[in-house]
Image (spheres, rainbow, N blue to C red):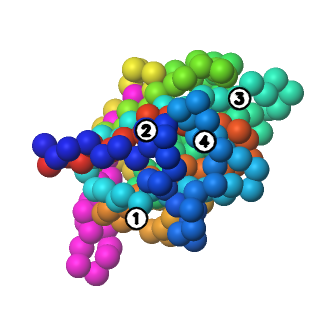
Amino acid sequence: MKEKVILFDGTSLDGFTRRDGSPARWELHDGCMTVSRGGGDIVSKFTYGDAHIHVEFNLPYMPDCFGQDRANSGVYVQGCYEVQVLDSSMNEVPSDSDCGAFYNITPPLVNACIGPDVWQTYDIILRTAKLNEDGTVASHAVVTVLLNGQVIHNNFTLPRNTPGGVFGQVVAEGPLLLQDHGNPVSFRNIWVQPLD
């Protein structure tokens, strides 16, 4: 098995850039990084295929906001597939736009979001898409996702990419993108373990 690649250890934003390749401009503090006003999405310099991706996030308390305005961000696997980050802890039946959803594709199996001001964890096991020589999809990516230790997607086949990512099409290898949706969501302890 290949070595784990640390994308963010709390000390530097050097593992990420903005979409245009310029230095990441999120706020760095207390071992974490937080979406800052005008910071924009950030993209990892490291790209991967099959992998275990680990991301920890903390949602700001936004009691006067609702729906997509409440602590919104996203973790884009391979820059293609958005696993939603959102304070939807109060929703009994999760939707395909709630925390843990693959945005506009499928809701999580259960609502495992535990609300604001608490560190939460995504562990994402990706078996990447396989492409034909002409770039068409031979087989789609398959993912298992745990949120806070609970399985919220189990060997789910991703039928397409989600909007807003790095690419307009499915890829076999890509970076991790963290979304700036205008809310001060924080992240820490981000790593990728490539899988043989």
Q: Is residue 106 above or below residue 60?
A: below
As rendered, which of 10 and 124 lies closer to the eye? 10
**Which residue is under mark 3?**
60
**Which residue is under mark 1?**
170
* Distance between the alpha carbons at the discs numbered 3 and 2: 21 Å
Task: Please indicate whether residue 19 sits to the left or right of residue 127 in the image.
Answer: right
Say which residue appears at 35% left-offset and 59% top-offset: 47
Find residue 62 and report its horizontal and vertical position in percent: 79, 28
Residue mark closest to the camera, 3 vs 1: 3
**Which residue is under mark 4?**
28
Helix, strand or loop at disc 3?
loop
Residue 20 visible in the snapshot = yes
**Which residue is under mark 2?**
9
Say whether disc 3 or disc 4 marks the residue closer to the N-terminus. Answer: 4
Say whether disc 4 or disc 2 marks the residue closer to the N-terminus. Answer: 2
Label 4 with label 2: CB-CB less than 8 Å: no
Helix, strand or loop at disc 1?
loop
Residue mark closest to the camera, 1 vs 2: 2
* Distance between the alpha carbons at the discs numbered 1 and 2: 29 Å
Q: Is residue 97 above or below residue 78?
A: above
Identify residue type, mark 4. Leu
